[in-house]
Image (spheres, rainbow, N blue to C red):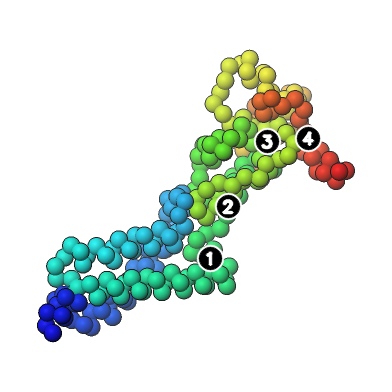
């Protein structure tokens, strides 16, 4: 009997099992909070809950395998508690949208109507250059192609593109002057900071109405595109069709 107790609990008393379960619940909730505060880019393609479970699994099974005086019963209790926490959170997230938002986050707008949603980029802790890099990786040449872009809770970016080509801020690395002239759109200028496009004969002297910067540059079109649609032409064509 003494050997069985040592195999199950090691050198710890049986009352330690309940204490371990309480410790685990507290650590698990704290870990969820820490991962939530670290942001979605840290989690990558895993959700915050999935990543927390992976970390806790490693912590749960590590000690009994490496420390002779630690029994396996506490580890089994930890695994059962982990399963219970996961099932409970999943059930609460299914019935209550607020629980899902608090534990995993929500989709954050990155691009709205062909311009960067700077007011949301700061909340997502994503720089302009990082946002441009994500869009380039998805085949976007300029912001005018994008109607909406979101940073999902998983850390991935999802896109909703315009059906008809529009002018926008060039996202690819700078090319030669001849190449730039080929893709430039006449009488169209884009804010170099947020991508907001205005129609003008020459670079505007006013500040951008969305970001307040004065960094105007020629708006461009996608390679191989001849006609460029205005801000409302696509909606008019859809209504006519």
Mark 3 and mark 4: span between their CA atoms? Answer: 10 Å
Circle 2: is it few (<14), some (14-19), or many (20+) Cα within 10 Å? some
Where is residue 154? Give x, y as percent: 50, 53
Mark 2 and mark 1: span between their CA atoms? Answer: 15 Å
Rendered residue at 25%/79% (across/down): 17
Is residue 211 shown left or right of residue 123?
Answer: right
Q: Earlier in the sequence, mark 1 or mark 4?
A: 1
Residue, far left: 2
Task: Report helix, strand or loop for mark 3.
Answer: helix
Residue tagged 1:
100
Q: Earlier in the sequence, mark 2 or mark 3?
A: 2
Residue tagged 2:
108
Mark 1 and mark 3: span between their CA atoms? Answer: 33 Å
Task: Report helix, strand or loop for mark 4.
Answer: loop
Where is residue 75? Give x, y as percent: 27, 71
Q: Is residue 18 above or below residue 47?
A: below
């Amino acid at each position: 009997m003494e050997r069985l107790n040592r195999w199950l609990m090691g050198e710890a008393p049986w009352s330690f099992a309940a204490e371990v379960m309480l410790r685990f619940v507290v650590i698990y909730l704290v870990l969820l909070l820490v991962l939530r505060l670290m942001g979605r880019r840290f989690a990558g393609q895993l959700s915050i809950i999935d990543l927390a479970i992976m970390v806790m699994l490693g912590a749960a099974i590590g000690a009994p395998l490496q420390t002779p005086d630690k029994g396996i019963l506490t580890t089994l209790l930890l695994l059962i508690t982990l399963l219970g926490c996961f099932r409970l959170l999943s059930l609460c997230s299914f019935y209550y949208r607020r629980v899902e938002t608090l534990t995993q986050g929500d989709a954050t707008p990155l691009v709205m109507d062909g311009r960067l949603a700077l007011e949301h980029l700061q909340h997502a802790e994503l720089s302009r250059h990082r946002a441009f890099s994500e869009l380039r990786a998805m085949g976007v040449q300029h912001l005018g192609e994008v109607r909406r872009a979101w940073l999902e809770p998983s850390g991935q970016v999802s896109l909703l593109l315009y059906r008809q080509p529009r002018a926008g801020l060039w996202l690819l690395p700078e090319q030669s002057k001849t190449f730039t002239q080929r893709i430039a759109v006449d009488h169209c200028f884009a804010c170099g900071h947020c991508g907001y496009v205005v129609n003008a004969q020459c670079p505007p002297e006013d500040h951008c109405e969305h970001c307040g910067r004065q960094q105007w540059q020629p708006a461009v079109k996608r390679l191989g595109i001849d006609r460029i649609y205005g801000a409302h032409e696509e909606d008019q064509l859809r209504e006519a069709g």
